[in-house]
Amino acid sequence: MKSILDFQERKNKKQKISMITCYDYTFATIVADSNIDCILVGDSLANTMHGFPTTLSATVNMMALHTAAVVRGAGAKKFVIADFPFMANRKGLTATMTAAEKIMRAGAHALKLEGGDEFTYKVVTHLVNSGVPIMGHLGLTPQSVNQLGGFKVQGRDEKAQAKIKEQALRLQDAGAFCVVLECVPSKLASEITASLDIPTIGIGAGPDTDGQVLVLQDMLGMNPGFKPKFVKTYFNGFEAIKEVFNTYHSEVEAVDFPTEKESYS
């Protein structure tokens, strides 16, 4: 995928979209050579790359740094979306535009912005009118984890469902080119997807969204202690990589590495 037009084309043709998070140059080169459609430089980098318990510790500078690394790795092969971090769009319009400029200048093709309140719509409209493509994010919005009372499914009752549906439509009206739906009932995600002209990307939102996104480290099994219901682990990365490290250690101890092959004469 090369532009936001490709997202709309996929929706129109009922072709699913695959998105994966990525935070560094090396993994970006691998994703770039894969069939994955697009990359999200998520504020989840606060967890996966920096060890913080939530995404709240991600900053504009962190997002710009990791975005630049990913873009260098992905080259022109993948469409790259970067997260707007916690509070970056809540300090006034000038500060918001400065933050957006910094991340976009780092190479992002679009920004993802959480929430669906009145203030968010105004920010989305202004950013879109300024040339910044915006992906919305509704349902479980990790930046609001303390307000939501923890990481849990959203939209369980009719009132909450109606609110998320309205938020999705308003984000579309504000100019968002796509909306992420996180941890909402499958039926709700399906109804929202059918009601929108723009595509939806699900994570813990069932199979009927227009696409799916997963955190790279989660799908590769890099964090064995983290296994939420919506994650499918495609590889036991933690154990596989640990075994490689242990093999290297054993060969060093036994003087099996380096051999003449790995040495200069």
Image (spheres, rainbow, N blue to C red):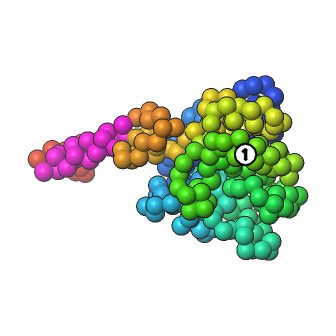
Give residue 178's position: percent from left, percent from top. 75, 43
Question: Which kind of residue does numbered mark 1 sit on?
Answer: Lys
The structure residue drawn at horizontal position 69% and vertical position 50%, both measured from the top left corner, is 137
* Placement of 216 over or under 82, stated as above or below: above
Give residue 158's position: percent from left, percent from top. 71, 41
Res 198 visible: yes
Q: Quadrant of residue 127?
A: bottom right
Res 18 visible: no
Q: Secondary structure at mark 1?
A: helix
Q: Left or right: where does residue 201 sit relative to residue 34?
A: right
The structure residue drawn at horizontal position 44% and vertical position 33%, both measured from the top left corner, is 234
Q: Which residue is mark 1?
A: 159
The structure residue drawn at horizontal position 72% and vertical position 60%, both measured from the top left corner, is 104
The span shown in magenta is: 236-253
Q: 134 or 92: which is nearer to us?
A: 92
Give residue 71's position: percent from left, percent from top. 62, 52
* Placement of 135 over or under 10, stated as above or below: below
